[in-house]
Image (spheres, helix red, strand yellow):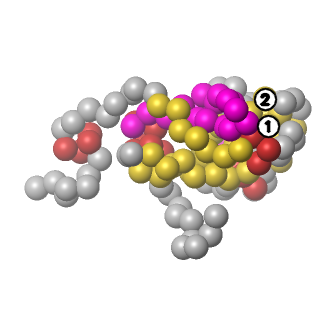
Amino acid sequence: MTAPDAPAEATGGALSDECEYVRICRSGQVPNGYVRRFYAETDHGQLELALARLDGRAYATSNYCTHLDCLLSSGKLQDDGIRCSCHNSVFELEHGRPIQPPATEPIRTYPVREEDGQVLVGLTERDVVEGGPRRRRPPGSE
Ligand code: FES
């Protein structure tokens, strides 16, 4: 018997790949040259994201390095991408490809729109179910 809150794939249902844009924060909360952690709240659950702005453009990625799961929101942006603070892997932000080891697997990336001073990230049910949550925000924190 399957638990009632099991992911759709575990129950034989298909996860939707239909993309829905979710408001994440105000544009000003992601200044140029910075990366920060945010949580997308969706009908399918919560997804932790790293939002970065490089050369004026906003990017959304998984917040977890594919090497050993360090938080990319604790990393630093550089000219060609984001550097993990743990062992210095670098990922380019457009497609998430690792461009400096030790990481060899790409991070997930998500489409971003900015409208009316807000950052919106395009997420599917599959993104949310397969990508989160790994760590929960402490109660009462932002
Ligand atoms: S955890 Fe990111 S480089 Fe090792």
Work out whether residue 48 or residue 103 is closer to the camera in this orientation and state it.
Answer: 48
The answer to whether residue 68 is above or below residue 11 is below
**Considering the image in quadrants, where does the C terminus appear?**
bottom right
In the rendered structure, the answer to whether residue 77 lies left or right of residue 134 reads right
Q: Residue at x 86, y 39 (%)?
A: 32
Label 2 SS? strand
Residue bearing the label numbered 1: 53
**Residue 109 figure quarter:** top right
Local packing at callout 1 (Cα closer than 10 Å; few below 14, some 14-19, many 20+) is many
**Residue 79 figure quarter:** top right
The answer to whether residue 75 is above or below residue 54 is below
Residue 83 circle label:
none
Work out whether residue 99 or residue 62 is closer to the camera in this orientation and state it.
Answer: 62
In the rendered structure, the answer to whether residue 59 lies left or right of residue 123 reads right
Q: Which residues are magenta?
A: 102-125
Residue 84: x and y in percent read 75, 48
Residue bearing the label numbered 2: 57
The answer to whether residue 45 is above or below residue 142 is above
* Label 2 with label 1: CB-CB less than 8 Å: yes
Residue 66: x and y in percent read 61, 45
Query: What amino acid is at disc 1?
Result: Arg
Residue 2: x and y in percent read 16, 54
Q: Residue at x 67, y 30 (%)?
A: 115
